[in-house]
């Protein structure tokens, strides 16, 4: 079934790719002609609304083990944020916010959706403007940024090879670059593909290849495992475990987080608390209602005086944290149950789809016009339902609280 699914999706991808190229040629040819303006706009809308088809990786072929080449050492303080202010319209994400990342930390940003994790990562990367305060990079810090939207750090009109060349510092032979690209499955003519026609998985692999060509000592990764197959995720985990630099990342992949993180920054209410330990340590401390000893927090610390008032406040905070952790677990369990149900329904639909596609290839069924039309309508309906299911699963996964 898996091989049939891959063959079916590969055929769909090729048909979509052919259509994409035809539309792009039309836009490139007529974009400057006023009498074709409406048609060009329509073609552009079709291109923008095309859903990305991700082809499951051939189990025989995946990213091989790789490692990040040694980069120059940075100073102890890798990045500091001083009194940072950042708003989006009327929504204030950070105000007078202080934060620091030190050498050797491999930190995950944890917290609810909308807490400001991606904004913080972008501020660290210098990818967004700040409204106030200072962003201070440490001595000899070289940043590598892996954006969740991918195209933020890729140039659509470049070929894969040209995109790889764009990060070369000094001289590197084409043979050396092609060798690195080959390790990420860009072989032969694949290196001549334009970035804009790459699938989600190919874009992720290209960004990783760029990070190997010009290795940074401070990595900032936003959902790096999205679109990667299981073997590729394992290879990335191994590479990051051996990575000698500093890392801050966001991920909803619990396996990836547990395997890589040695520090957790909990982002909440415009502040950050630091837990110096792995993700399981963080969950344990949250469950016990304990606050970390070294925290980055704008708000007042728990009073240290052993007065009745101080102890009462501490007790209230602990009870609140325990209550929040209990709610978080129940919330996530409910979401995962719903996701599992949707995934099972999707698998049944895929099985039905493959069966009907195979049936339509039979001369007997093909000659039965009524049955063929009925199967065709059902296949279109299944495609629509699967698309809606995928969107719902993505929405539910985004609501999981780490």
Image: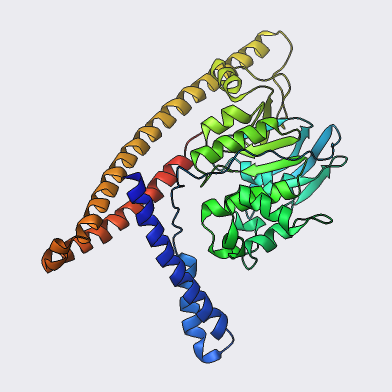
Q: Is 82 situated left or right of 336 in this image?
A: right
Q: Quadrant of residue 155?
A: bottom right
- Report the number of numbered marks: 0
What residue do we see at 49% from left, 38% from top?
230
Q: Quadrant of residue 222?
A: top right
What residue do we see at 25% from left, 57% from top?
357
Residue 368 in the image: above or below residue 309: below
Looking at the picture, tell me which residue is in the foreground, 190 or 331. Answer: 190
Residue 176 in the image: above or below residue 242: below
Q: Is 73 situated left or right of 206 in this image?
A: right
Residue 329 in the image: above or below residue 9: above
What residue do we see at 75% from left, 56% from top?
167
Q: Is residue 60 visible?
A: yes
Q: Is 376 situated left or right of 135 in this image?
A: left
Q: Quadrant of residue 116?
A: top right
Which residue is outermost to the bottom? 35
Q: Is residue 149 visible?
A: no
> Residue 330, how many percent across, how many down?
41, 27
> Residue 338, how many percent across, how many down?
34, 37
> Residue 280, how many percent across, how many down?
57, 21
> Residue 316, how many percent across, how many down?
57, 17
């Amino acid at each position: 079934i898996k091989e049939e699914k891959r063959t079916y999706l590969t055929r769909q991808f090729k048909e979509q790719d052919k259509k994409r190229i035809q539309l792009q040629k039309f836009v490139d040819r007529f974009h400057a002609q006023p009498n074709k303006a409406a048609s060009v706009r329509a073609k552009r809308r079709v291109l923008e609304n095309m859903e990305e088809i991700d082809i499951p990786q051939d189990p025989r072929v995946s990213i091989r083990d790789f490692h990040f080449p040694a980069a120059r050492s940075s100073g102890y303080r890798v990045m500091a944020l001083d009194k940072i202010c950042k708003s989006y319209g009327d929504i204030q994400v950070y105000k007078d916010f202080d934060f620091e990342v030190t050498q050797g930390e491999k930190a995950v940003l944890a917290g609810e959706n909308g807490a400001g994790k991606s904004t913080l990562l972008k501020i660290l990367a210098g990818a967004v403007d700040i409204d106030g305060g200072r962003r201070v990079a440490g001595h000899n810090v070289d940043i590598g940024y892996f954006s969740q939207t991918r195209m933020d750090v890729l140039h659509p009109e470049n070929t894969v090879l040209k995109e790889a060349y764009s990060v070369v510092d000094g001289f590197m032979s084409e043979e050396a670059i092609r060798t690195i690209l080959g390790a990420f499955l860009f072989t032969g003519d694949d290196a001549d593909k334009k970035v804009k026609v790459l699938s989600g998985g190919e874009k992720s692999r290209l960004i990783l290849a760029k990070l190997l060509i010009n290795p940074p000592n401070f990595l900032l990764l936003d959902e790096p495992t999205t679109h990667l197959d299981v073997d590729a995720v394992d290879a990335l985990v191994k590479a990051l475990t051996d990575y000698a630099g500093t890392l801050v990342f966001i991920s909803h992949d619990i396996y990836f987080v547990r395997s890589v993180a040695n520090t957790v920054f909990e982002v909440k209410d415009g502040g950050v608390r630091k837990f110096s330990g792995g993700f399981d340590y963080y969950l344990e401390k949250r469950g016990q209602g304990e606050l970390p000893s070294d925290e980055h927090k704008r708000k007042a610390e728990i009073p240290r005086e052993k007065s009745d008032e101080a102890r009462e406040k501490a007790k209230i905070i602990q009870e609140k944290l325990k209550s929040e952790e209990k709610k978080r677990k129940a919330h996530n369990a409910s979401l995962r149950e719903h996701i599992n149900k949707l995934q099972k329904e999707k698998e049944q639909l895929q099985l039905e789809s493959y069966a009907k596609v195979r049936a339509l290839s039979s001369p007997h069924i093909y000659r039965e016009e009524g049955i063929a039309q009925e199967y065709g309508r059902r296949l279109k309906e299944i495609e629509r339902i699967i698309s809606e299911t995928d969107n719902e699963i993505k929405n539910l996964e985004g609501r999981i609280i780490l």
